[in-house]
Amino acid sequence: MGWFEFIPVLLATFVLLWLPGMAVGAALRLRGAWLVAASAPLTVSLVSVAAVIAPWLGLPWGLPPVLGLTALAVVAALAWSRWVTPCPVRLPSRSFATAIGAVLGGATIAFVLFRSIGDPGWISQRYDNFFHLNAIEFVIDTGNASPLWLGNMTSPEGLPFYPSGWHALASLIVQLTGASAASATNALIFVIAALVWPLGVMLLTRTMLGSRPMLVVGSGVLAASLPAFPYLPLHYGVLYPLFLGLACVPVILASAFRLLRPGPQFGPRMFWVLMLVLLVPGTAIAHPGALLAFLALSVPFVVGFAIHGFVTGRSRRWLWLVALGGYVGFGILVLWIVRPPLSQIYWPRIERFPQAIGEVVSAAVYEYPAATVVALLILVGAYSAVRRPTYARWMILGMAGIGATLYAIVAGSDIETLRMWLTGPWYNNAPRLASVWAVGVVPLAVLGLNTVSRFVGRRIGAVALRRRTSRLSKVTLAVVGGVLLVLTQGEAIRQAAADIEFTYELRAGGPILTPDEYALMHRISALVPEGEVIAANPWTGASFAYGISGRRVLMPHLLMDETDAAHVINTEFDSQGDSPQVCDALAETDVRFILDFGPEEFMPNEGDYSGLDELANSPFVELVAEEGEARLYRVVSCGLDEVNK
């Protein structure tokens, strides 16, 4: 698929992500920036909850369960707006500034992805993408996108929960457009990174800092200024579910800030409780780590609200202390429940603690080059929050402080108990918390930009910047936004782009696949009948065949529970291909083809696939197709040669 043919897939992805949530938002009487920014996160919740409900109702996964839940949600939202309370807030119109910020930030992110991905049909050749790409096909094959089901792809016993929001959305795109799982994945990446994320950041900063035009433009530009998000999860891992969840977090933070901001001017709090109820399920099912990121970054809101209530309360101040203690206890309970199994929390620190602090200060987390301009804006923002404190500025500083603290602990602390309790829910994995840091720190950088722009405006007496109806002021706003964009797209972003390009580019000696292997996998759908299974050594990259061709593979992931039948095929086929145990295993698993990418594996492992590595002269198979050294064989032992005929 070329880029021109990719445009309809992008448009379908945009419509899918915005229309269901926009219908619910409009029924709640969300308007302006709130409606635009909250629509996609609301859709993520609708799709995620529909994925859970559909199997209980006996419905196959597809658009009907989503549309049905959306219709019910719209009716409920209309009733809420009529008899409880509609959206109590309307942000001042800043249509031109919003458009400039969204275009500058979103187009920059899209351009970086365009240059880095190379082809919309290519895939990220990374460890976790074996699961994510193949899980999209698994959802389509089984008609089930529930997080309570998705783990069955890799475990006969089933996993109790695996975040499935990403796979549910991508499978809908495949069903709507007929695109491949790879193209659907890339379409989701573009729309989430270039639209959902910057619009959410712009809403959060407008909610906390106001709607000054330069602030609105700057928030969109600065959303594209840090490699830690949205780029890092797209080449490390890859962490697609966490990427989806974190992109929704700014809108949830904006709702929480509205709920917990002291004072009556923010209208009935029940509406913002409803918004959290609507938004949180999508983030939780997208990835629990994103939900925990929201809970962590919103701690200043809760503490600030409790302190305000304690200080201003005339009686029963002890209730505020009890409530705050209950919140702390709830937080500890959540950390304990959501924490992954200890066997999965094995990432060590990556540097010394002072170095981690230095990375935070210089905006160079996870050993990226320093984002100098952004780092200066963050420092100015911190100074501004301390020098001229307001409630919102303290909250912004608190979010950035929590993000920085979590990253410094996970990256550099040698106190394993501290790491286990505070960063264990993110697997003690520094890249995940680098992305959380980026989400928490962008508003502080915007505050720094706001401070700098006001200082410069006062010094130069820029009357044109204040004349809202002046064409010159709009041009100036766009020019200043462009200058800021140029200043923030430095070496750190170039490194992030190069990292993504490395994972996508098809070349000899690439991270996992060669061009010949990729070409052969694209031919498999025409060579292997539906329902028949392909055996292969996943550590050669051959298991990507499921997500690329749509034909099932015996081992769809690198680490999975191997059945007894699969073990027999993987270890004995080439030497005992007509033995009773191998024939029984072939019959049980429906394996009829074997994909051979040679003996070279992309990383050391403990898997045993010795039964699939001596097939060139084997009497048990016949060659069906080859591309270079990549070969597809048909099994002809156990009487299957007659069946094939």
Image (cartoon, rainbow, N blue to C red):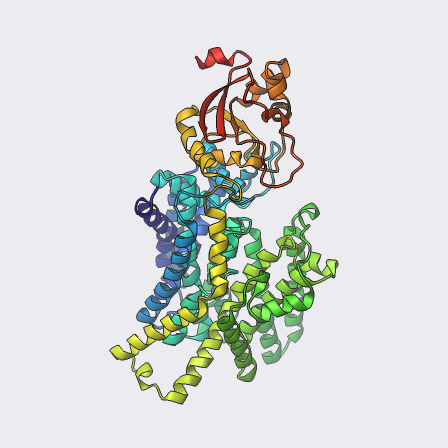
Residue 194 is drawn in which quadrant?
bottom left
Residue 100 position (above or below residue 505): below
Residue 569 is drawn in which quadrant?
top right
Residue 402 position (above or below residue 341): below
Which residue shows up at 46% across the image and 56% down it? 497
Image spot of residue 393 (x, y percent): 52, 76
Image spot of residue 66 (x, y percent): 40, 44
Is residue 469 among the parts visible in the rendering?
no
Is residue 458 among the parts visible in the rendering?
yes
Q: Is residue 216 left or right of residue 313?
A: left
User: Residue 76 versus residue 198: which sits nearer the camera?
Assistant: 198
Which residue shows up at 50% across the image and 39% down it? 513
Which residue shows up at 52% across the image and 78% down it? 380
Image spot of residue 396 (x, y percent): 53, 72
Q: Quadrant of the C terminus?
A: top left
User: Residue 283 versus residue 474: which sits nearer the camera?
Assistant: 474
User: Residue 8 versus residue 508: which sits nearer the camera?
Assistant: 508
